[in-house]
Amino acid sequence: MKTVFLTVGTTSFDELIETITRSDVVQALKARGYERLVLQVGRGNVLPAADSCPHIELEAFRFKDSIAEDVRQADLVISHAGAGSCLEALGAGKPLLVVVNDRLMDNHQLELAQQLHADSHLLYCTCSTLTETLRTMDLAALQPFRPPQTKNFANFLDKALGLR
């Protein structure tokens, strides 16, 4: 069963959880052949019920000790732009769509998403452009992200965040 796994990490990103369960977004996922949606909702206030999306199988949870198995089983990972979540999905070799929280003030997450997109490792959008991105995305254009040495990743983050 073709599966999407969405993670917001340890944060709260209710706007993304509300957006992914809207009928237009679910229809865009269905049009791409996805039949199952697994949501890791973190500390947010929104925890959708399994029957809240009638056209797709839905599972939602707040936290697990590890999401590695959810990532491994996913055909597409949708994530907030946290470095840890991005690295976990990319390190597992999964196609990644990052949804940047454009309501954050000092948005270093946008810089990280832009740099990884510029290197063709992921696609990114905001909640307002998620439906269109799902409709038009070309996952075949993404390049594998080779798990870097810790020092290299730290240097990459410094570069992406403008610290170097």
Image (spheres, rainbow, N blue to C red):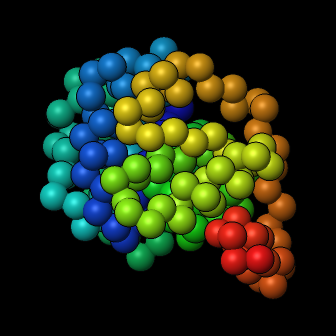
Is residue 26 depicted above or below 50 in this figure? above
Q: Image quarter for residue 110? A: bottom right
Instruction: Please name the residue shown 61% across and 46% down the image.
Output: 96
Give percent across and percent down for residue 156. Answer: 77, 71
In the rendered image of this protein, does residue 63 appear above or below residue 53? below
* Percent position of residue 50, x then y: 21, 40
Location of residue 56 with respect to 69 vertically, above or below: above
Residue pictured at 43% horizontal, 25% vertical: 131
Out of 39 and 162, give the one closest to the viewer: 162
Q: Position of residue 147 (x, y in %)?
A: 80, 67
For the view shown, which residue lies furthest in the top direction?
31
Query: Which residue sits at x=76%, y=39%?
Result: 142
The image quadrant of residue 139 is top right
* Total tally of numbered discs in the picture: 0
> Residue 107 in the image: x percent, y percent?
48, 62
The C terminus sits in image quarter: bottom right
Residue closer to the observer: 96 or 34 = 96
